[in-house]
Amino acid sequence: MSYAYLFKYIIIGDTGVGKSCLLLQFTDKRFQPVHDLTIGVEFGARMVTIDGKQIKLQIWDTAGQESFRSITRSYYRGAAGALLVYDITRRDTFNHLTSWLEDARQHSNSNMVIMLIGNKSDLEARREVKREEGEAFAREHGLVFMETSAKTAANVEEAFIDTAKEIYRKIQEGVFDINNEANGIKLGPQHSPSSPNSPGGNATGGLGGGSGCC
Amino acid sequence: MFAYSTSSFTGSTLSVRSFSSDTTISNAFFNLPQNHVRGRLHAKKRNSQQAKRRNKRAPLRTHPQIPRQMSLFRNFFGGGQPDDDEDNGAEFVETLVERVETCSAPEDRRDALRALKGVAKQYRLAVGTMGMNAYIDVLETDRLNSETMTLVLDTLATVLSADDDSSESDELGERLAEMMIKRKGFIASVLAAVDQFDFGVRRTSVQLLSNLLRHRGTEVQNAILQQPAGLSKLVDIIHDNREVIRNEAILMICELSRANSQIQQLLAYDNIFNDLLNIIETEPLDSIVIEDCLFVMLNLLRKNSMNQQLFRENQLVARLGGILHTFLYGHEETEEVDVDSAEWPKQRTANVIFLLQIIRTLVSPDNNSQNTHAAQKVLNQTKILEELIRVLLSEIGASVEILTESIIVVAEAIRGNYTNQELFASTVLDNGEDAPRSSLVVLLISMTAEKQTYKLRCAVFYCFLSYLFDNEFGKTRIIETLLPNSQNQNTLTTGALIMQAISSAESVQAWFGCVTLMHCLYDVDHLCEQLLRVKLTVVADQQPELSLLDHVSQLLISAGNRRPQTRAGLLMLLGVWLQNCPMAVSAFMAKEDNLLYLTTNIVDECGEGSESEQQALRGLMAFVLLSCLKNIQEKDVRTSIETLISRRVGKEVVLSALEGLSRTEQFVRAAQKQQPSENNKNNLFLDFNFVKLFKSLEGTLAKQLKPNGEFNGSSNDSIIQSFKELIKRQDGDIAQLKQENKKMSTEIEKLTAEAQNKETERELEQLRIKLEESTSFKTQTEVLNSQLAEAQRLTQQWYAEAERYKQWAQQWQNYQLAQVPNAAEVGVTQLQQQVAELEQQLGYGYQAFEQQSQTILHYTAENAQLRERLVKADASISELTSKIAIVNSQPPSNGVVENGDQKSDDELVKLKQEQEELLMLLADQHNKMSVYRRRLKSLGQPVTDDEDE
C-alpha cells in the first residue's frame, strides 16, 4: 500500500503503564490483559488518513524498565512523535514524567511532537492522579494531553491520530525537514517500483538444459 | 625535524633505519589523497578483484609494509635476529613516547607521534602499551588538531591489526583492544573523533572502531550503546559523500552488526536498510562495496524477526526484487548486450549469491513460522519467486553457483506454502522441442543427471522435498503418475523419474529417489495403499508384472551387505511405507525372503560401510522389523514372527540395534537441518523427517518386545526420565555435598579458631620468652654498666697515677739537669767536634780537587808542548818532502849526486821512521789527552770545544 508520508513514533514511560497495550489496541484493535514485559524494542504499523492523505504510522514500543533506558534512549533521535504514557492509578508513574521528558528533550530532535497520555482511564475507582493534574503538567511543558484506555479503546485512536495531525501540521508549516529521514519522517514512494519486466523467452533452460541424462 | 631526530638517536643503526622508514611513511601520508584518487580510478579500470578490494576499501593499508620490507632487509643483513629488534623496539619506542609526553613544541610532539606511527606495525606491543597515556591525552585534549588526531588514531588502528590478513585470532590485538576499551571515556573519544568532519580524523577513527569491534565486539557494542545517539552518528557516516569514508563506514558496520540484536534493531530503526539499498543501486554490478552492503543486511536480518518484519513493512523486499532483476539481466538501457555474454565477473556472481542469501534468510525454516510465511507471501506478491523460478528454467548466463543458490531460495520460498508450491509446479519450461516440461520434471531430471554437480543435485532434491512438504495434493499428484490408469504413457512423468532414480546403480541417486518417494508417503496414509497398486514393467519380457513393493524389497535383498547408502534409502522408504499400512505389511511379509534378509543382516557385522553406517543400518532394519510386527493384524502370524525374531536374532539384539540408531553420527547430523548436507554426498544417509518419525515411534516399537521393561532409547520421555533421575541423583548428591560442605566449613572454622588460639598461645609464649630474654638482657646490661663504671673509675685512677708519674719524671729530669750545670756546653762542644770533623773532610776534598786541577794544568801544558812539537814536526816533514822533491827533480848527473842521493835516501828512510814514531807519539798523546779531558769533565771542570779538538 502506498502512502504519502511515514511517521515514526516512539512510546515511552514507566514499565507497566500500558505502552504495549496501547500499540496493540491501535494496530490490532485488541487488548491483552496479561502483562508481557517488552524486551528492548518492538514495533507496529498502521495506516491512517489525515487531510485526505494516506499516512503510515510506524510505532516503536520501548521497554520501560530502567535497565533498557540507555537502549531506548537511542531511539529518540529518529522519531517524529512520542507518546509519553503514565498510569493514572499509579502516582509514581506520574512523578517520573519529568525525568522522562528531560530525557526525551535531550536526545530527540527539537521538533518532536510529544503527547502526554494518562492511560487506564477505565480504572476510575483506583485513580490516583487527577485529570486536572495531567492537564496542568501538559500545559506547563507544552504537550498535548489525553486520557486513554487501552482496554476499552477509549481515545486510543485519537491519541495516535492527533499526534499525527500535529506532525502533519508542522510539516505543512515547514518546520520539519522532510528530506532527512533521521527526523522520523519519510516521504512515500512517488511511484511504487514497477514489477520487474519479464525476461525474453528464448532461453534454452537452466536445469532443462541438462536433460541429456540416461 | 631531520636534525632533531638524528641527533636524538645518534649511534644506533636501528634508529637510523627506523628514522628512514618514518620519513617514507610520512611522505606516503602526505600524498594520500591523490594516491587514493588514482587508486580509485585504477581500480575501476582493472578487473583484478584483489586490487580493487584493497584500493576501494582501505587505500592506506598498503603503506605499513615499508617497515616490513625493512625487517626483511635487516634479516638479510643482520643474520636473522629479529628478537633483538623486538627488544630494541621497546627502548626506541620509549624514547619517542617520552618525547611526545615531554615536548612542549607542537612540531616536536607531532614528529614523535609520526615516528611512533611509522613503527606501529613493527612494534605493535611497545607502541600500543607504552604510548597509551599519551594517545588518550591527545584524543581528549587535542581534538581540534586534526593532524595529531589522525596520527594517533592511525597508530591505534595499526597496532590492532595483525600483519597478515588471515582471520586467525590475533591475541596481541585482542589484548591491546581490551586495554584501550578499559580506558574510561575511550570509546566516547573515538566516537567524538568519528563525528569530526576532517577526512583523516574520520577515516582513521572509523578504521580504529572497525579493528576494536573485530577484537572485542561485545564490549565495544555495549560501550557504543551507552552513548546517547552514538549509533545514529555512526549510521550517519554512511551518508558521507567521500567514498573512501563511506566504504570504511560500511566495513565498520559489518563488524558492528554482528550478533547483537539490540544493535541490529537500532541500525534498522535508523533506516540503514534504505541507505544500503541506495548505495547498492548506485554502485556498478561488480562492485565489492555491494557485497559489503549485502553482508550488513544479511547480519541484520538473519534470525532477527523484528528486522525481518520491518524489512517487509517498509516494502524493501520489492526493492530487493528490483535489484535482483538488475543483477540478473543488467541495467536495461546500458548493458543489454552483456546479457548473453558467457561469463560474469566473479564479484557480480558473489553479489548475486549474497542477494539470494538475503532473500533466503527472510523465508528460512529457522525463522518463526509466522515470519517465514509472511515473507513467502511477499516473495510471491513481489514476483521475486516467479523470477527465481525462471532462473531455474532458463539460461541467463548465471553460473552454476547462482543456479544452485536460486534453487535453494525457491525451495525455502515454497516450503509449506501451498500457493507458492502450486505456482512452482505450474511453471512450465517450453523449450520448443518436446512437449513442455513442468518445473518438477525439470528438477527430477537434474537430480538424476550424474553429470551435474553434487551441490546442484542436492539443492534440487531439497527443492523437491520442499515442494512436497505439507502438500498432500502435490504428493497425491505424483503418486498418481505412477498408477496404471495414468494417461501420459509417453511423456516423462515425475513418478517415472523417481522410479528410475530408485533403481539407479548410482548410490546417491538411489538414495535421492527413495527419500523422495518416502516424502510422498510421509504423513499421508492413504497414499501408502495407493502405492501398493503400482506395477512395474521394468523387466517386461521375463515376468508379467512386478509390484513396486516387491521391486523395492528385491533391490534391498540384491544389495546384500553392500551399498550402505542405497540400503539406507530403501529401508527408510520401507519403514515409512509399512508404518500405518497393514496391507503393505502383509504384502511385505508374504515374501519369506524379506524377513530372512532382515533377520540375517541385522546381525551381520561385516557389511560395507563405516562402523557407524553399519550401526545405522542395523537400526533401520530393526525399525522395519518392529514396524512390521506392530502393524500385523492377525494374532497368529504376529506371535510366530515374534518367536522367529527372538529365536533367530534375539530380542535384545533387535532392541539394542534400534537404540543404536539414534547414537550414530548419521542420525545426529540428519536431525540438525532440514536441508540435506550439501558438502559431501557420502554424508547423506538418514533423512530429517525420517529421524523425526523415528523419534516419535521408537518407544512404541521397543515396547512390543519388552512390554514391562524400561526403555532407554532416545524417546523424549525416557530421556527426560533419565535426566530427571540424574537430576534427582545429582540433587541428592548436591544436598549431601552441601551438608558435608557445611560440616566441613564448621570444622574448618573450628580448626581455624583452634589454630588461631594455638597461634596466639604460641605467640604469647614467644613473647614471654622474649620478655624473659629481654629482662635477663636488662640485668646483664646493668651488670655490665656497673662494670663499665668500675672500669672507668679504674682508668681514671690510672690516668691520675700516670699523671703523677709524669710529674715525678719531670721533677726528676729537672733535678738531673740541675745536677749538670753546663749541660748546654757539652752539647755545643759535641757539635763543634762534628763541625771540625766535617771541615777536615771538606779540606781533604779541596786538596784532592786542587791536586787534580794541577795535574790537569800540567797535562794541558804538556799537551800544548806536544802540539807545538807536532806543528814543528809537520813543518820539518813538509820541508823534507819539498827537499826530496828537489832532490828527485835534480838529474842524477854525477856520482856525487849519486852518493848524495844515496845519502839522502838514507836520510829519507830515517826521516820516515822518525815521522812514524812522531805520529805514534801523537796518537798516544791524543789518547792521553782525551783521557784527561774525561777526567776533567768528571771532576766538573769545564772543557772547551777548543780543547776538545
Image (cartoon, coloured by chain):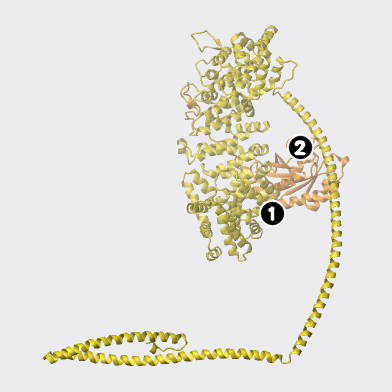
Chain colours: A orange, B yellow
Name the residue that disc number 1 marks: B185
Q: CA distance from mark 2 to mark 1?
A: 43 Å
Q: Residue farthest to the top?
A: B636
The residue at the point 68 percent across, 23 percent down is B695
Tell me which chain the residue with mark 1 is part of. B
Horizontal and vertical percent position of residue B343 = 46, 36
| Residue kind at label 1, given as amino acid type | Gly
Q: Is residue B569 above or below residue A60?
A: above
Image quadrant in which the N terminus of chain B is located? bottom right
Numbered disc total: 2
In what element is the residue under mark 1? loop
Residue nearest the observer in this picture, B592 or B947: B947
Residue at the farthest right position: A125
Discs 2 and 1 lie in a common subunit: no
Is residue A179 in view from this perspective?
A: no
Based on the displayed image, in which of its 4 quarters is residue B578 positioned? top right
Which of labels 2 and 1 is toward the front?
1
Which disc number belongs to residue B836?
none
Residue tagged by mark 2?
A: A25
- Do residues under tags 2 and 1 come within 8 Å of each other at their CB atoms? no
Mark 1 neighbour class, 10 Å CA radius: few under 14, some 14 to 19, many 20 or more: some
Residue at position x 48%, y 41% from top? Answer: B334
